[in-house]
């Protein structure tokens, strides 16, 4: 009896021990995986460093406490707790793009369809996975080379990635020369220079003087799969502005190179969502061996280009399929020809490796197709200008009644279209007089801005500008005489005035400032924020997050112009030292309401680690 009792006790003891081991194992797996996930993301003391004495010219941080992101902008409540400093992200995050971070996709185990490029689309981190730290410049960072010299060369230290120079060495994308990276103007299809290639396209279309702007009729261009954007760079001398588009893919940093050069560019992909541009925005779309399967999903990607092209717009396609040398090329060419034929496109010109298709001027061809022809016309309730997070559809966007009647977009040639009231202004119920008044108001405001900046700014100080709330684009229009370009940003939840901006011959994108922008760090010289802080307060988003995002995309020595209410200005002033920004000027809005103009400059700073690595 005693033996059986002892055996039972032993069994109970073993069972208890097993239960404890299993419980401890569960705790280890649960908390261990959580901590590993945080470590992978770069959270904790290893990835965040206090700036304080570790940056060039910094103030000592005596309390050593790590900042926690908790305060928000409040206009009518008590004082917020303001940190002495923001922490600094680890140096490996010097090129962080929060909503296009592949590491985040892997760590969150998002189930994305790689075959349709869904992993290159925007996927923003949830609040608990935001970094909430300052993005450091890379070791040896220098103030960028000024435009127009920057078109042809940049500092290697600013974008220390040379793999494209080796990978594309036979195509003249870029060449490493000492401390600089040089851009000879070549591309995958135009090894001997984008300028000659552009002239050949104009010649194919019989444009006068081989000038692609066609006497001002071609102004806005979309370059898909742009590489380092040499095509867009050389269009600028013809008074053509291109939105150079490419994803953050295997050819990493191509858009970063484009923006460092001072060329308009944006991180984006033809995947599952519409591109963030309204319908009828571009006179010409371009693809030079952009490695896009245009036949996939019933031609949905080609139909997205169709949505974006104006009446009579062109698609210049340079690819092996255009000259069809083998069976596979012939098959693709036949299928593409059949598809664009059903879309009512016609061949405008074809030579060597390039074909140029032209979109119809009216809806007549669409109406004459056989019933049941694919692709179908889009539903009558489809808004072709809704773009923020809207899935693409394999359908043809018909023209508006105005475009059908006008047999075209009815736009004046450039540069007259910049100040001429555009036809789509009527979509918003605004009159020509209101448009002209807005243009004149912003002309005076921009003149005032430049007077305030005059002690700090010269003709070549700024190149890449962003208007964070562009309205009609009159801020950018007022800068026509300056050697700059402007990314006009229109809020995703406001009036979609971006189509008016494109009608003026300007470029821009839709965005929600509660999220990070689709660009690399240090890519803009000047940010203009007109009531942007007041707007995000109404949405309940963090003004602190917005400050950190503005700091991320602003180049060292760059400027911020804030035009907003006094409480906003007071809020921003409390964070200047934390961000290492300094006030340049403050001014009233000259009897235009209660807005205050506040101008700031970002200091150039380097972490001690960056300094050591650059020596």
Image: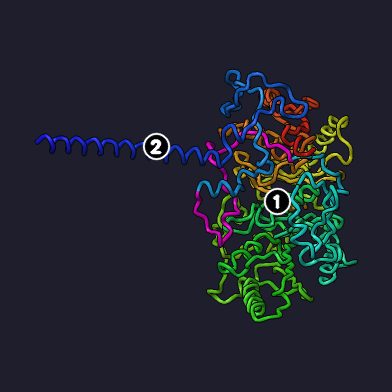
Point out the image quarter for the C terminus.
top right
Q: Position of residue 445 (x, y in %)?
A: 80, 34
Residue 363: x and y in percent read: 65, 68
Residue 327, placed above or below residue 41? below
Q: Tell me the SS state at disc 2.
A: helix
Q: How many marks?
A: 2
In the picture, which quadrant includes the N terminus? top left
Q: Which residue is found at the position 68% from the left and 64% from the top?
A: 404
The residue tagged 2 is 27
Q: Give the camera-side residue of 116 and 563.
A: 116
Left/right placement of residue 390 relative to residue 610 reads left
* Front-most of residues 298 and 611: 611
Classify mark 1: residues with Cα within 10 Å, few (<14), some (14-19) or many (20+): many
The secondary structure making up most of the magenta span is loop
The answer to whether residue 190 is seen in the rendering is yes
Residue under label 1, please give it. Answer: 266
- Asked if one can make out residue 220 in the rendered structure from this viewpoint, the answer is no
Residue name at image x 13 percent, y 38 percent:
4
Q: Which residues are magenta?
A: 109-138
Say if 419 sits above or below 353 in the image.
above
Mark 2: few/some/many CA within 10 Å (<14, 14-19, 20+): few
């Amino acid at each position: 009896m005693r033996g059986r009792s002892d055996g039972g006790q032993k069994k109970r003891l073993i069972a208890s021990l097993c239960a404890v081991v299993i419980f401890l194992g569960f705790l280890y797996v649960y908390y261990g995986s959580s901590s590993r996930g945080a470590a992978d993301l770069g959270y904790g003391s290893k990835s965040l460093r206090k700036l304080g004495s570790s940056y060039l010219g910094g103030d000592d941080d005596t309390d050593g406490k790590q900042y926690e992101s908790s305060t928000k902008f409040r206009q009518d409540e008590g004082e917020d707790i303001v940190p002495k400093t923001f922490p600094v992200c680890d140096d490996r995050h010097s090129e962080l793009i929060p909503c296009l971070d592949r590491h985040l996709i892997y760590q969150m185990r998002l189930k994305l369809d790689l075959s349709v490029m869904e992993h290159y689309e925007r996927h923003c981190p949830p609040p608990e996975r935001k970094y909430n730290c300052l993005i450091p410049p890379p070791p040896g960072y220098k103030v960028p080379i000024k435009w127009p010299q920057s078109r042809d060369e940049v500092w290697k230290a600013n974008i220390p990635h040379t793999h494209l120079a080796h990978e594309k060495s036979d195509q003249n994308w870029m060449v490493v020369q000492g401390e600089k990276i040089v851009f000879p103007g070549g591309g995958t299809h135009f090894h001997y220079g984008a300028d000659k290639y552009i002239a050949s396209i104009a010649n194919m279309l019989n444009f006068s003087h081989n000038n692609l702007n066609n006497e001002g009729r071609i102004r806005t261009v979309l370059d898909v799969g742009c590489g380092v954007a040499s095509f867009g760079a050389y269009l600028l001398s013809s008074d053509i502005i291109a939105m150079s588009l490419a994803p953050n893919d295997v050819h990493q940093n191509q858009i970063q190179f484009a923006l460092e050069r001072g060329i308009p560019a944006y991180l984006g992909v033809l995947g599952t969502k519409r591109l963030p541009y309204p319908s009828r925005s571009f006179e010409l779309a371009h693809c030079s061996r952009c490695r896009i399967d245009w036949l996939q999903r019933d031609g949905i990607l080609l139909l997205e280009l169709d949505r974006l092209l104006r009446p009579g717009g062109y698609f210049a396609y340079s690819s092996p399929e255009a000259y069809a040398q083998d069976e596979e090329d012939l098959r693709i060419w036949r299928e593409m020809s059949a598809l664009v034929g059903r879309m009512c496109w016609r061949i405008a010109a074809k030579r060597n490796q390039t074909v140029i298709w032209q979109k119809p001027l009216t809806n007549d061809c669409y109406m004459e197709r056989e019933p049941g022809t694919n692709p179908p016309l889009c539903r009558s309730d489809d808004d072709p200008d809704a773009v923020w997070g809207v899935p693409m559809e394999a359908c043809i966007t018909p023209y508006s009644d105005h475009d059908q009647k006008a047999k075209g977009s009815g736009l004046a040639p450039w540069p007259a279209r910049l100040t001429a009231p555009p036809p789509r202004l009527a979509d918003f119920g605004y009159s020509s007089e209101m448009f002209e008044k807005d243009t004149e108001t912003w002309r005076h405001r921009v003149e005032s801005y430049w007077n305030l900046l005059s002690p700090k700014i010269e003709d070549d100080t700024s190149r890449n500008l962003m208007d964070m709330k562009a309205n009609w684009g009159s801020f950018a229009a007022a800068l026509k005489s300056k050697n700059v370009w402007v990314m006009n940003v229109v809020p995703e939840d406001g009036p979609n005035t971006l189509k008016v901006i494109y009608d003026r011959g300007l470029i821009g994108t839709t965005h929600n400032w509660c999220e990070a922008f689709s660009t690399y760090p240090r890519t803009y010289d000047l940010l203009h924020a007109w009531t942007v802080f007041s707007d995000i307060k109404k949405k309940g988003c963090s003004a602190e997050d917005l400050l950190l995002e503005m700091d991320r995309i602003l180049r060292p020595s760059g400027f911020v112009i804030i035009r907003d209410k006094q409480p906003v200005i007071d809020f921003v002033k409390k964070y200047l030292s934390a961000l290492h920004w300094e006030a340049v000027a403050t001014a009233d809005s000259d009897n235009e309401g209660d807005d205050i103009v506040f101008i700031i400059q970002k200091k150039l700073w380097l972490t001690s680690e960056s300094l050591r690595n650059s020596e």
